[in-house]
Amino acid sequence: PESDMTVESAQGYPTAAAEVVTPLEPPDTAGIKETTDLEWINHALAGMWPEFQDVAQFMLDKKILPMVNEKVKAKTDKVKEISFQEFSLGKIPPRLEKIRATNLPGGIAKIHAWFEYRSDMTSVIKLETTLGTFTSGIKDLCVKGDAVVLMNPYEESSPGTASCSAFLVDIPEIDFKFAGQGAAFTNSIGLKGIIVSIAGLVMQKLMVLPNIISVNVGMLDMKIYPPVLEQPDPIGMMRCTIKKGGLAKGEQAKKGFSLKRSFENFYEAVDTAMGKAIGKDMTEYFQLHLGDQVWEPRTTEVDASYDFMVVDPQQKFYFSVWDVDVSGGNDKMSELGPYHLDQTQALSGKPLTFLDEDKVPYATGEFKMEWFDIVPDTVGKHDSMVIAGIRELKVKGSDKDMGKLRVKGKLGQVERQSNSGAALKDKLHTANVQEALEEVRERMQGSKIEESVINEILDLQPKQTRVSINGSIDFALKSADIPSAVLEFTIVEILKDKDKTEKIVGQKSVKISDLQAAKGMNIPSPMTITGSREIEAEIDLQLCGMVPGPAPGEGKIIAVHRHSVSQGA
């Protein structure tokens, strides 16, 4: 049976707003101090915090800064290079403000934690520009969000294995200020917004739903396997249809030329005129996003639809409206949300008003929001869904010259693709094997064997390369179309050239009528895919019915449905 316990920290940051909760008293356990406080776990976080410095530095150097430089240089030609002159996380760690622990069927524990990070970090950003070199400090960094940890003592698909998975429910709130002599310049080019956007994007790709990080533990030998990125199956789907939209009254007039207009509006008018002159569609667009799924219909579109796959009831929707620019990035003019799933469905058919930064109506929109529960091993009365769970690809030969692989699927006019997967470490490349090979090399050198012969002998390559995907691609279709529907799989290799060219290396078609006729409406893996490479794909196909009904609210607690994950050596 499911059960809940909520615990709140008694000591937060001095300015942190406390949330009113009724904590449940823990059981009376001999030798353990009875408490509803979270100081014990916050103390543990403080002890681990220094170890996160190297991780943060790596993410900053390899993930965030390259994207920031690319974005800023596309926006202005005044910036040559952006780097960090100094970077330290500081000594103050994040704090847990509240946790909610839920026992779920199968012995799974789901821990929902709300955290806040008010940093004492020391960071100085350096900008090389055509106007000279500017430096600016970052202060008052604050990050707030909520994370979920799933602890499973028994993986049904991998007997003898337990797992711990973690994900962020949404992109955390990030805020900070620039200080120092370069603050004015950094603010003038919109650097803060770019950094916040890119940092959020990096976190989203790693561990914001539907992306989760899992670690498996062998219960017999207590071996801890490397972290794995994966995506669970959907529990439901929200179909969004735009019914009407457009700029609010008065905004249309701003598109014309006027000497009374502010400089910003004048710039926007000139930019719009330039766009139209070169044939670019300058119509504003809505953006609806849920996790890493984004839909961007123009404000003038009518009856266009998009299907959002939902993996957890705690996911949230955001609505925004954007202005199109010829140069640089487009501008977010207004945003509504976040909304939980039941709140999103309640907006169906209601006019939404988007206010600009001056709290003046900028645009209006109306959407139809339909929720569908997904029921396996059945066909829906009107709508059904095909779930393709992709674990890994087994490719004949070595990965020596192979790029990353991605699985694409097409059903009717709908196209979806998996994350790109890299080759898993083979046993030949583990530390123990490499040490043994190095010892063999030294002995052969001592026997005066030619170096070219040694290199040829020790150039051991695996007969098969395993590429981890650990995700799913999902397709909704009309049940009446099942007899004629065909799901087309394409595996592409992302070449190692500068343009990251995609090369088709295998293709396979599956009739949905065959899937319906299969036992349990399920075609289990493996699947042989033919092409320029010999590939055995661990793709599991499941046909499900879609049942319309009320969307779940935030209080609905489930364990996300995970596949057995592809794990390296």
Image (cartoon, helix red, strand yellow):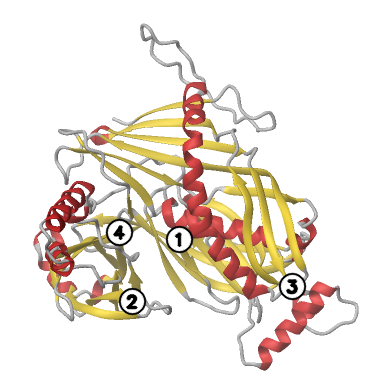
Toward the viewer: 561 or 144?
A: 144
Mark-to-mark CA distance, 3 and 2: 35 Å
Pick out the residue farthest to the right: 260
Three-letter residue code for mark 3: Thr
Mark toward the start of the polypeptide (1 vs 4): 1
Label 4 sits on residue? 471
Mark-to-mark CA distance, 3 and 1: 36 Å
Q: Position of residue 167 (x, y in %)?
A: 41, 46
Mark 1 and 4 residues: CB-CB less than 8 Å, in contact?
no
Q: For numbered disc 1, what is the local secondary structure? A: loop
Mark-to-mark CA distance, 2 and 1: 24 Å
Q: Residue at x 55, y 79 (%)?
A: 301
Mark toward the start of the polypeptide (4 vs 2): 4
Three-letter residue code for mark 1: Asp
Mark toward the start of the polypeptide (3 vs 1): 3
Label 1 sits on residue? 292
Q: Position of residue 521 (x, y in %)?
A: 15, 62
| Labelled disc at residue 495 | 2
Report the mark closest to the observer, 4 or 3. 3
Report the mark closest to the observer, 3 or 2. 3
Q: Where is residue 509 in the image (x, y as percent from the top left)?
A: 18, 77
Q: Could you tell me which quadrant the N terminus lies in? A: top left
Q: For numbered disc 4, what is the local secondary structure? A: strand
Mark toward the start of the polypeptide (3 vs 2): 3
Q: For numbered disc 3, what is the local secondary structure? A: loop
Mark 4 and 2 residues: CB-CB less than 8 Å, in contact?
no
Report the mark closest to the observer, 4 or 2. 2
Three-letter residue code for mark 4: Gly
Q: Residue at x 54, y 64 (%)?
A: 66
Label 3 sits on residue? 130
Question: Is 173 drawn above or below residue 2 in the view shown?
Answer: below
